[in-house]
Amino acid sequence: MATVELKTSFEPEELKAFMKNEFRMKVEFRNHDPEKMYWCESDIVAKAPLSLAHDMPLENGRIRIGLLRPNSTINKVVNLYTLPNNFPDSYRINFVVYLYDEEGTISSRIEETCSIECRQNKAGASAGVSSTAGIES
């Protein structure tokens, strides 16, 4: 059985309600196995009002993570967006991670869920402005 750990973090850490948001999710994949190497892919499901596209609803996507070597870590960044119909709530993002062994068969399938909070705008904040991630590439 594969010993892979998945961690997520967001920039910004929370979303603003009733406006478009652009945010980045950093996903860290860590292989704790000292001997085995895996090819790693992940399906991502982000239900509305979250979207994987900036201009239309897109719930499903796949990322190719790459070769996860023994005792190594790979980081990937996924851009996510909201449509302006988001309300104060906690929005979940589901992952299904597939680990392929050296024979090309699925060695392990890992399901994970993370969430990001969407909060009401504070008093005095201007409406109709987009919130964007301020991460340097």
Image (cartoon, helix red, strand yellow):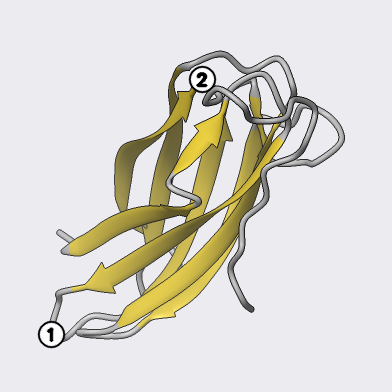
| Most distant residue in the right direction | 55
Say what secondary structure mark 1 lies in: loop
- The spot of residue 94 in percent (x, y) is 43, 34
Q: Residue at x 56, y 24 (%)?
A: 121
Amino acid marked by disc 2 = Gln
Q: Nearer the viewer, residue 100 or 92?
A: 92
Q: Residues within 10 Å of mark 2 (few under 14, many from 20)?
A: few
Task: Say if residue 103 shows up in the picture.
Answer: no
- Residue 82: image tag: none
- The spot of residue 47 in percent (x, y) is 58, 23
Say what secondary structure mark 2 lies in: loop
Q: Which residue is mark 2?
A: 120
- The spot of residue 90 in percent (x, y) is 40, 22
- Residue 34: image tag: 1
| Most distant residue in the front direction | 124
Quadrant hosting residue 63: bottom right
Q: From mark 1 to mark 2, how far is it between C-alphas?
A: 46 Å
Q: Residue at x 59, y 22 (%)?
A: 17
Q: Residue at x 37, y 61 (%)?
A: 99
Mark 1 and mark 2 lie on one chain; the one further toward the N terminus is: 1
Q: Is residue 63 above or below residue 86?
A: below
Quadrant holding the C terminus: bottom right
Q: Nearer the viewer, residue 5 or 91?
A: 91
